[in-house]
Amino acid sequence: MKVKEKLLLSTGILFAMIILLTALSIIYVNRLSNDTSNILVANYNTLDYSRKMMMALDNNIGNTTNRKQFEENLRLQHKNITEPGEQELTDSLAANYKALLLHPADSSFLHRARKNISSIMLLNMQAIERKSKIAAETSDKSIFWITVIGTICFVIALTLFFNLPGNVANPIRELTESIREIAQGNYARRIHYPGKNEFGDLASSFNTMAEKLEEYQASNLQKILIEKKRIETLINNMNDPVIGLDENRKVLFMNNIALKISGLKAEDVMNKPVQEIAVTNDLVRSLVQELFTENKEKSETKQPVKIYANNKESYFEKQIIPIKIIPTGEMKEVLMGNVILLQNITPYKELDFAKTNFIATVSHELKTPISSIKMSLQLLENKQLGSLNEEQKNLVDSIKEDAGRLLKITGELLNMTQVETGSIQMSVAPSAPNDIVDYAVNANKSAAENKNIKLDISIPANTPQVLADKDKTAWVLNNLISNAIRFSYDHSIVYISVNEENGKIKFSVTDKGQGIAPQYIGKIFDRYFRIPGTKKEGTGLGLSISKEFIEAQGGFMTVESEFGKGSSFSFYLDTCSQ
């Protein structure tokens, strides 16, 4: 039987039993109502009439009121004849009453009339008793049949309550479990339902699907193995080291280059937890350390991994690529493993070293002739050697300006080479913030006066000493003030402030110039970066070197700018109390 038919039949039977129970209850209630109504209407009224007639006889029938009462109740009794023999008794009562009226002194007629009334009352009381028995029988019968039908309805409802949900839910639950196993790759799972119904048809279709999936898996297994072999060959022939880990951080593969630089063998690492390998291998430990670090924040600049390989130092750029997928039928992304890729950047590093050395050499060599040019300019300006005309003075000033700019550029290039080679020599010691600010301000007084720019200095009297390299920090502040003056409008103000904030000394330089567009805020500390379209001169190295100098002292730099309203550059260094 179909599930739909079974449901319809079950609910139909239950519905029919409820209708039957309702109809039976109505029938028996009506019967009880009729029986009780017959007792009340017929017999009870007769007793009431008889009682009143008896009272009229007892209270002197010769009285007009009593006679009217008797005759009225007698008339009503004639209309309420319901029992066999009651008509004869009522007629006899009427005859005796007439005789009593004609012969009031004859007490025998009174006695006969009372006897007739008593007989009528007895007859009706017997009828009441008989009808009460009939009503009791009707009540017992109705209780019996209502109980029987109600019990049958209860048994059917209870049977449906326990069996019907299971008949529907159990096959669905088994089907759900089977589908879940199919999704996990158990294509050998089958479902067997007895009977020819919807669930049987569903089981048949499911089994057909599972069988086809099993055949498909078997037919594609060879293709998958071939593709796996192809991928393994491709990975092993890569020139860069590659390490693959599964979701439990077990080693899935390490290509030949990775095995070579780590000094490991394939049989020693395959399917083993990488943390066990890292215990005895320094290189593997440094490569996977990031995976086991609780702090997942990545630094902005990653240092290359230096490895001694091929009888020389080699440099690799490490990249950890998480492998995440969304399983079929699910919504949440799941981590399936990680791939550690090391890109060999040794040739680029060697070129970078060569470039740095070249820049350092050229910058160093340029400083000497530039210094000689500046010295010669000072001699030309000495009036003891002769006076210069106005045109010659303009030429000397122009040469001096260009020589100063060249000297600044070569100085920045030399500082950059120190940064790139990691040879920054810091002499960190307690220093007075006033001395650092005074040096930077004095170095920029002339430039500020040329543009009528006021330098507003704010240093609280109780500012503690700062732990810093005085010369390099003064150079950084000098660079920030110089930039603020260059990018400020004439007759404006450049604000220079020093204050203590969160246990650090904060140096700030704020201008009211054109500011920096939002899209360039994150790039201004990059080397050689200059805001597109700017007409101001510069190498694009000053801010980058400044940031490196501050970070080398354990501090950090920040920038806040609103385009069209100005910029504020700040750097923070530790106080001597820390």
Image: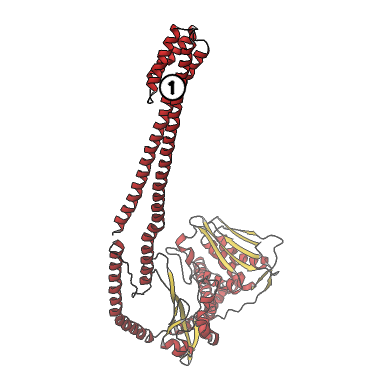
Q: Nearer the viewer, residue 473 or 169?
A: 169
The image quarter containing residue 221 is bottom left
Residue 131 versus residue 315 in the image, above or below: above
Give the mark count: 1
Q: In the rendered image, which quarter contains the N terminus?
A: bottom left
Q: Which of 174 and 504 is in front in this view?
A: 174
Left or right, 89 with respect to 66, comes to left
Left or right, 562 with respect to 231, comes to right
Residue 121 versus residue 494 in the image, above or below: above
Residue 383's x, y, as percent?
A: 59, 71
Q: Which of 265 and 214 is in front in this view?
A: 214
Q: Is residue 70 in view from this perspective?
A: yes
Residue 237's x, y, as percent?
A: 37, 87
Tag 1 residue: 46
The image quarter containing residue 194 is bottom left
Q: In the rendered image, which quarter contains the C terminus?
A: bottom right
**Residue type at the position of mark 1:** Thr
